C-alpha cells in the first residue's frame, strides 16, 4: 500500500486522516479490512481495490472496458467510528490485445501467479493485459490461454507426443473457441487421412483429427457442456524432416453466449472468407460440422463467391447448402478446375454428383444460413479432382457477403 504521508512510522488512524482519496491499495496486499478474491475463468472477474471515489483517470491503450462493465462495491468499515474509504472494483476477464498479440485482462497479481507476461493495461488501468501460454505437459484454466509447440516460435522435426490440458468452469462454460493463429504439420494423404501427424481433442465428434496447414484466421468451436473436464489436446508427430509449429488461442464461451449446437464455425460479420482446413492441399477425412452465419438485421440474402479451384468429392463427401435456398447459374464441365465446387442438398441433388456450378451464387433463407461440411472418415476415394489431375483443386475457398433486403 502506498503511504501518502511522509515521515517516520505513524499510527493507522493518522494515515487515514492525511491520505487523499486518490491513493490506491495495491492488488495483492492484505489488510484486516479488505477481502480480496480472484476468479480467472472465462466468465470470471478480476478484482482490484481502490480508495473510495478514486477511479484512475485516463484511457487504457489496450483492452479498454466501458465504465458500465466496471462494478464497484464500497466495503464496510471495521468500526462505525471510521468512514469507509475502500471500493472493490470488479472487471471481466475478457480478451485484450496489444498490437497483434492478444492476452486476457487480469489483475497484476493473477498475471504473475499464472506466469504471464504483462502487455499493457486494461479495464481503465485497473487490470493488465496478460499473455499466457502453455506447451507440452502444461495445464491452464485461464480464458485466452495460448497452446504453443515446443520452443515456439521455433519449429521442430522430431517425433513427439504432446499433451496439453485445459480445465474449465463446468457450471459456466459451454463451449471453447479455438483460434488457429499458426498451425503447420505434415499434411494428410490423398484420401484426407492424417497418417504422419495428428492433432486430436478427446471426445470431439466434429473432427477425428487435424493435420496440414490452417487457413488464415481459421477458428473452430468445441461443444463442452456435459463433457469430461478438463479438455485434453494431443499433438502427435512422427520423426521426419518436415518442420512443424503451432499456436492456438483458447477462448471460453459462457453458456448464455453459446452459438448454435453443431456449428464448428460461426461468422458474425457481414462479409468474410470461409475455407476448408488445409485448403490448397487435400481436405481432411472424418469431419462433420456446420459453417454457420448469424442472421444480420435488414439482410435477406447471402452471396457466395469462389476464390480459387475448389472441389468436394460428392456424394461420399458433402459441402451442402439448405434445401431450396439456392439460385445458381448454369452448370459447367465437371473437368473444369476453375472457380467451381460440388454440392448436394439434404433431399435431392442440386446438380448431379461431381457436376459443378458457376460462381457466384446467391442463397435465400428466412433464418441463419447453415452450410454442412461432412467427409467420410474411412473411404478410399481421392479427396481431389483426379479426373482433372489437379491435386491442389481440393476443398473450398469462398467469400460471403450478406445483402440488404
Image: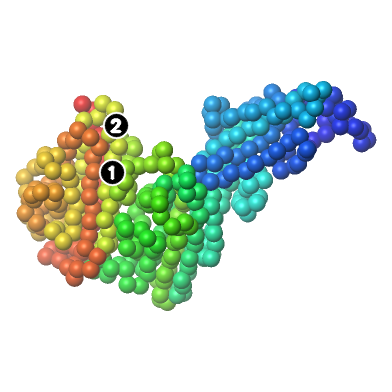
Which residue corresponds to mark 1?
292
User: Which residue lies most toward the bottom here?
Assistant: 239
Quadrant in the picture for the C terminus: top left
Q: Is residue 82 left or right of residue 248?
A: right
Residue at left offset 48%, top offset 65%: 163
| Vertical arrangement, residue 158 with respect to residue 79, above or below | below
Rounded to the nearest angstrom, the CA distance separating label 1 from label 2 is: 12 Å
Q: Secondary structure at mark 2?
A: loop
Residue at left offset 62%, top offset 43%: 38
Residue at left offset 14%, top offset 39%: 325
Q: Is residue 152 visible?
A: no
The quadrant where residue 6 appears? top right
The residue closer to the viewer here, 52 or 65, is 52
Q: Is residue 44 visible?
A: yes
Residue at left offset 60%, top offset 32%: 124
Q: Is residue 155 left or right of residue 87?
A: left
User: Which residue lies most toward the right here?
Assistant: 8
Which residue corresponds to mark 2?
296
Q: Are marks 1 and 2 in contact (CB under 8 Å)?
A: no
* Figure label count: 2
In the drawing, what numbered circle is on residue 102? Answer: none
The quadrant where residue 336 appears? bottom left
Spot occupied by residue 224 in the image (x, y as percentages of width and height): 40, 52
Q: Secondary structure at mark 1?
A: strand
Label 2 crowd bin: few (<14), some (14–19), many (20+), radius 10 Å: some
The residue closer to the viewer here, 41 or 390, is 41
Spot occupied by residue 21 in the image (x, y as percentages of width and height): 75, 24
Label 1 crowd bin: few (<14), some (14–19), many (20+), radius 10 Å: many
Spot occupied by residue 43 in the image (x, y as percentages of width and height): 50, 41
Amino acid at each position: 500500500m502506498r503511504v501518502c504521508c511522509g515521515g517516520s512510522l505513524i499510527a493507522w488512524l493518522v494515515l487515514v486522516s492525511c491520505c487523499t482519496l486518490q491513493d490506491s491499495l495495491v492488488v495483492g496486499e492484505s489488510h484486516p479490512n479488505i477481502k480480496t478474491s480472484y476468479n480467472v475463468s472465462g466468465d470470471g472477474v478480476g478484482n482490484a481495490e481502490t480508495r473510495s471515489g478514486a477511479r484512475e483517470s485516463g484511457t487504457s491503450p489496450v483492452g479498454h472496458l466501458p465504465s458500465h462493465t466496471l462494478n464497484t462495491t464500497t466495503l464496510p468499515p471495521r468500526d462505525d467510528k471510521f468512514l469507509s474509504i475502500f471500493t472493490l472494483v470488479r472487471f471481466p476477464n475478457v480478451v485484450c490485445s496489444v498490437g497483434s498479440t492478444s492476452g486476457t485482462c487480469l489483475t497484476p497479481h493473477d498475471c504473475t501467479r499464472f506466469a504471464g507476461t504483462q502487455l499493457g493495461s486494461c479495464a481503465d488501468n485497473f487490470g493488465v493485459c496478460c499473455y499466457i501460454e502453455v506447451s507440452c505437459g502444461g495445464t491452464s484454466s485461464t480464458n485466452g490461454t495460448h497452446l504453443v509447440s515446443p520452443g515456439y516460435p521455433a519449429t521442430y522435426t522430431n517425433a513427439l507426443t504432446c499433451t496439453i490440458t485445459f480445465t474449465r468452469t463446468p457450471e459456466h462454460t459451454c463451449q471453447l473457441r479455438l483460434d488457429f493463429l499458426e498451425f503447420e504439420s505434415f499434411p494428410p494423404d490423398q484420401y484426407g487421412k492424417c497418417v504422419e501427424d495428428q492433432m486430436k481433442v478427446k471426445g470431439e465428434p466434429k473432427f477425428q483429427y487435424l493435420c496440414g496447414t490452417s487457413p488464415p484466421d481459421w477458428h473452430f468451436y468445441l461443444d463442452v457442456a456435459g463433457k469430461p473436464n478438463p479438455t485434453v489436446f494431443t499433438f502427435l508427430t512422427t520423426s521426419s524432416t518436415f518442420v512443424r509449429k503451432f499456436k492456438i488461442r483458447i477462448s471460453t464461451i459462457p453458456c448464455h453466449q453459446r452459438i448454435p449446437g453443431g456449428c464448428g464455425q460461426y461468422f458474425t460479420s457481414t462479409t468474410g472468407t470461409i475455407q476448408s482446413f488445409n485448403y490448397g492441399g487435400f481436405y481432411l477425412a472424418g469431419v462433420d460440422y456446420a459453417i454457420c452465419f448469424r442472421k444480420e438485421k435488414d439482410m435477406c440474402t447471402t452471396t457466395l463467391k469462389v476464390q480459387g479451384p475448389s472441389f468436394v468429392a460428392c456424394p461420399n463427401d458433402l459441402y451442402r447448402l439448405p434445401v431450396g435456398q439456392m439460385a445458381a447459374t448454369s452448370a459447367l464441365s465437371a473437368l473444369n478446375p476453375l472457380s467451381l465446387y460440388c454440392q448436394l442438398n439434404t433431399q435431392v441433388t442440386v446438380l448431379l454428383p461431381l457436376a459443378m456450378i458457376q460462381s457466384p451464387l446467391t442463397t435465400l433463407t428466412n433464418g441463419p444460413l447453415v452450410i454442412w461440411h461432412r467427409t467420410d472418415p474411412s473411404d478410399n476415394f481421392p479427396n481431389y479432382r483426379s479426373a482433372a489431375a489437379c491435386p491442389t483443386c481440393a476443398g473450398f475457398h469462398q467469400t460471403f457477403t450478406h445483402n440488404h433486403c
